Image (cartoon, grey):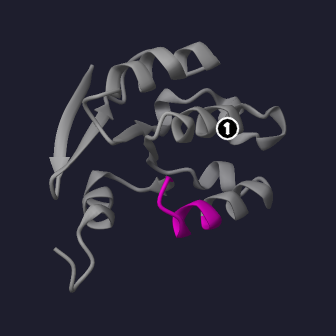
């Protein structure tokens, strides 16, 4: 199941932790882009919904997923604990650090952290 919620006026498609795994490029188009297109600016995907290949950067799957989201103008947020994946090497932790500094791809603990990240900066409206 997917739900559209708003955080600070920004529509977010939040995928349920239960459901089909995002394992192929077509899954990205159908389950993420297709479900959110025209309805949400941000897609939040629990780690449980991502194929293990996403966290092995050598497969290129994470690049395919993130590229599609950026190409369609959607921000992608990976929700949940990825510490078991980041402990396995240096490439993924570097990607997480760099992504979290930007505005398009984030790795966050939960929807509370997502809401905080989407909050307007002090002094902006």
**Image point (63%, 19%), residue name:** 25
- The answer, for residue 21, to whether it is visible in the render is no
Asked if residue 105 lies left or right of residue 15, the reply is: right
Whether 100 is among the magenta residues is yes
Q: Secondary structure at mark 1?
A: helix
Residue nearest the viewer, comparing 26 with 71: 71
Region rendered in magenta: 97-104
Q: Quadrant of the N terminus?
A: top left
Residue topped by disc 1 = 62
Relative image position of residue 90 (x, y in whole percent): 79, 61
- Vertical comparison of 93 with 5: above or below: below
Residue nearest the viewer, comparing 60 with 125: 125
Whether 42 is among the magenta residues is no
Q: Quadrant of the C terminus?
A: bottom left
Local packing at callout 1 (Cα closer than 10 Å; few below 14, some 14-19, many 20+) is: some
Residue nearest the viewer, comparing 49 with 41: 41
Q: Quadrant of residue 61?
A: top right
């Amino acid at each position: 199941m997917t739900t559209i919620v708003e955080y600070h006026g920004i529509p977010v498609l939040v995928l349920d932790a239960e459901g089909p795994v995002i394992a192929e490029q077509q899954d990205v188009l159908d389950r993420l882009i297709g479900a959110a297109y025209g309805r949400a600016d941000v897609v939040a995907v629990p780690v449980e919904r991502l194929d293990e290949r996403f966290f092995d950067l050598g497969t290129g799957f994470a690049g395919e997923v993130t590229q599609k989201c950026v190409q369609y103008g959607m921000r992608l947020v990976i929700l949940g604990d990825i510490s078991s994946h980041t402990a396995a090497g240096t490439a993924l932790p570097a990607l997480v650090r760099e992504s979290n500094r930007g505005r398009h791809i984030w790795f966050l603990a939960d929807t509370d952290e997502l809401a905080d990240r989407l909050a307007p900066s002090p002094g902006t409206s």
